[in-house]
């Protein structure tokens, strides 16, 4: 008997994840396939979109080969992806070059020049975001100035998820939630502003038509079916930004709810009913219609602990590392970690920022360093929440997602640092689940987002802040902020 299942595809920074869910949010089968990040020059971080596609094909074949489901059981497909890609493709959809990814800062000089020429306030008033090298628009201009032979052949610049949607359907699309990377996208009216594109020296035709995130773009083609094992004719929705899909998959879809992200990168997303912007934060459309997300996105997240494990904890599991941290007192006896391992995004937006351990001495242990790392990521989260408070929004409860949410210690540190309650949903596959929910709403398997969230997401753990620890962390937070200010000029020199 045929099942009604939903496929979520997540194009992450380190791997592609594919997961099949039933209508109650249970994972039927899942797979993860890694790929490379290329660092050819200082400040550059690139990926090959065709490597994403190869990983997705392999992952889908693996889950279909498990015997737990057939391709015909998959009713619809949703795709989410990392932010701020700029994938140049020609009219036939061939990738012309690697895409700079969200960590890439090569277009810094372009940003400085464009802000002077076009006007920083004019750009912000329309896009709701500052003109910074991480975003898509400066990368498009970088191709124009530095790869003219590629730019001349480029028909469209695609986002990570829209490229995979194209590979599945043969149709080029631009979902609303990823529009925030394009500075001639009007965040309030959800349209392209051609005059502003021309001010940048671009044309609005370089980006595809806009789609709602739950809108069906097309169906799986015969060619895509042969490469993936999927059934031809399966509907594919536009999908969206990974952070926004993860926000939905963590149960955040109503005004005032907030997601705390603990994947490779860190950050938070506050759900609002209007385009509430702050120059030091990030504004995007939510994947849920008529909702926006005021976001903080940090470089420091699970990736920082992964780096530490690779370099200083080989042979140990993540649980064993955090056990060493657990016996260290809150505040790490004065050891502070700045988690700026690839520059930093919000709220400091400093591509020169460096990772720093401060306060080491002969009496400090590896456990001190691990706990300081966990606390440093929490300080980065709190820095964004304090910045968001300047807009007047109030955050009381955080819904956690990502691998770090599985750590009771790390979650408690975040609760103590922020002074806020943290809820952990049942699924640690929040991002792929969010993409699958979009597909389910889009094809009518759910009546709306309220039903979808209530049916698929349950809170399994609630961690309340220890306010005594919060007072300790407030003092450490002051040192964390001061260290950056004291080192900022040094970062630029070396």
Image: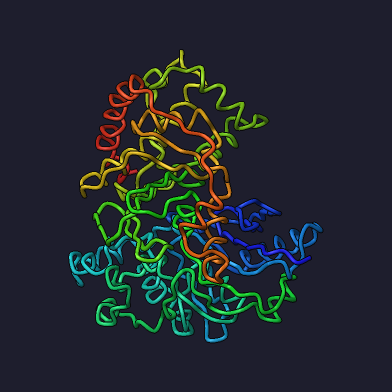
Residue at position x 32%, y 78% in the image: 192
Kindly indicate the quadrant of the structure image that contains residue 57: bottom right
| Residue 213, image x, y percentages | 46, 69
| Residue 404, image x, y percentages | 52, 38
Res 489 visible: no
| Residue 293, image x, y percentages | 35, 56
Kindly indicate the quadrant of the structure image that contains residue 138: bottom left
The C terminus: image quadrant: top left
**Label total for image:** 0
Q: Is residue 286 above or below residue 346?
A: below
Foreground residue among 153 and 255 = 255
Q: Outermost residue toward the bottom?
A: 91
Residue at position x 51%, y 71% in the image: 238
Foreground residue among 37 and 370 = 370
Is 309 left or right of 250, judged from the image as shown? right
Q: Is residue 466 above or below residue 158?
A: above
The N terminus: image quadrant: bottom right
Residue at position x 61%, y 64% in the image: 52
Res 470 visible: yes
Kindly indicate the quadrant of the structure image that contains residue 445: bottom right
| Residue 227, image x, y percentages | 73, 73
Is 26 left or right of 387, judged from the image as shown? right
Q: Is residue 187 above or below residue 96?
A: above
Scheme of image coloration: rainbow
Foreground residue among 388 and 109 = 388
Q: Outermost residue toward the top?
A: 363
Foreground residue among 97 and 443 = 443
Q: Is residue 160 above or below residue 491?
A: below
């Amino acid at each position: 008997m045929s099942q009604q299942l939903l496929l979520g595809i997540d194009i992450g920074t380190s791997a592609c994840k594919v997961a099949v869910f039933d209508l109650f949010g249970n994972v039927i089968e899942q797979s993860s396939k890694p790929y490379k990040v290329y660092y050819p020059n200082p400040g550059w971080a690139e990926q090959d979109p065709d490597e994403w596609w190869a990983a997705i094909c392999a992952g889908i074949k693996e889950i279909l080969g498990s015997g737990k489901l057939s391709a015909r059981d998959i009713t619809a497909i949703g795709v989410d992806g990392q932010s701020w890609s700029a994938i140049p493709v020609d009219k036939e959809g061939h990738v012309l070059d690697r895409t700079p990814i969200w960590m890439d800062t090569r277009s810094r000089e372009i940003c400085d020049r464009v802000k002077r020429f076009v006007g920083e306030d004019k750009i912000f008033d329309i896009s709701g975001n500052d003109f910074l090298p991480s975003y898509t628009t400066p990368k498009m201009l970088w191709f124009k100035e530095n790869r003219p032979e590629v730019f001349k052949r480029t028909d469209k610049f695609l986002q990570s998820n829209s490229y995979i949607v194209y590979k599945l359907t043969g149709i080029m699309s631009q979902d609303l939630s990823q529009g925030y990377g394009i500075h001639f996208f009007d965040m309030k009216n959800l349209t392209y502003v051609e005059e502003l594109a021309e001010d940048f020296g671009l044309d609005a035709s370089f980006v595809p038509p806009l789609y709602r995130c739950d809108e069906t773009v097309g169906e799986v083609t015969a060619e895509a079916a042969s490469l993936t094992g999927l059934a031809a004719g399966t509907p594919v929705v536009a999908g969206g930004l990974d952070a926004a899909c993860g926000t939905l998959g963590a149960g955040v879809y109503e005004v005032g709810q907030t997601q705390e992200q603990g994947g490779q990168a860190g950050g938070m997303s506050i759900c609002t009913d209007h385009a509430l912007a702050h120059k030091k934060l990030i504004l995007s459309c939510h994947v849920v219609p008529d909702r926006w997300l005021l976001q903080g996105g940090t470089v420091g997240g699970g990736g920082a602990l992964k780096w530490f494990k690779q370099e200083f904890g080989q042979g140990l599991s993540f649980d064993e590392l955090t056990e060493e941290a657990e016996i260290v007192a809150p505040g790490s006896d004065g050891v502070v970690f700045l988690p700026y391992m690839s520059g930093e995004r919000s709220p400091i937006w400093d591509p020169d920022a460096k990772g720093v351990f401060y306060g080491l001495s002969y009496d400090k242990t590896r456990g001190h360093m691990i706990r300081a790392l966990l606390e440093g990521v929490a300080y980065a989260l709190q820095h964004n929440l304090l910045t968001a408070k300047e807009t007047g929004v109030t955050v009381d409860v955080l819904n956690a997602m990502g691998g770090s949410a599985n750590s009771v210690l790390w979650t408690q540190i975040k609760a103590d640092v922020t002074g806020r309650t943290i809820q952990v949903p049942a699924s640690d596959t929040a991002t792929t689940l969010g993409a699958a929910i979009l597909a389910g709403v889009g094809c009518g398997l759910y009546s709306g987002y309220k039903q979808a969230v209530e049916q698929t997401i349950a809170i399994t753990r609630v961690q309340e802040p220890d306010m005594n620890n919060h007072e300790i962390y407030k003092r450490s937070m002051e040192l964390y902020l001061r260290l950056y200010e004291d080192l900022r000029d040094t970062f630029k020199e070396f």
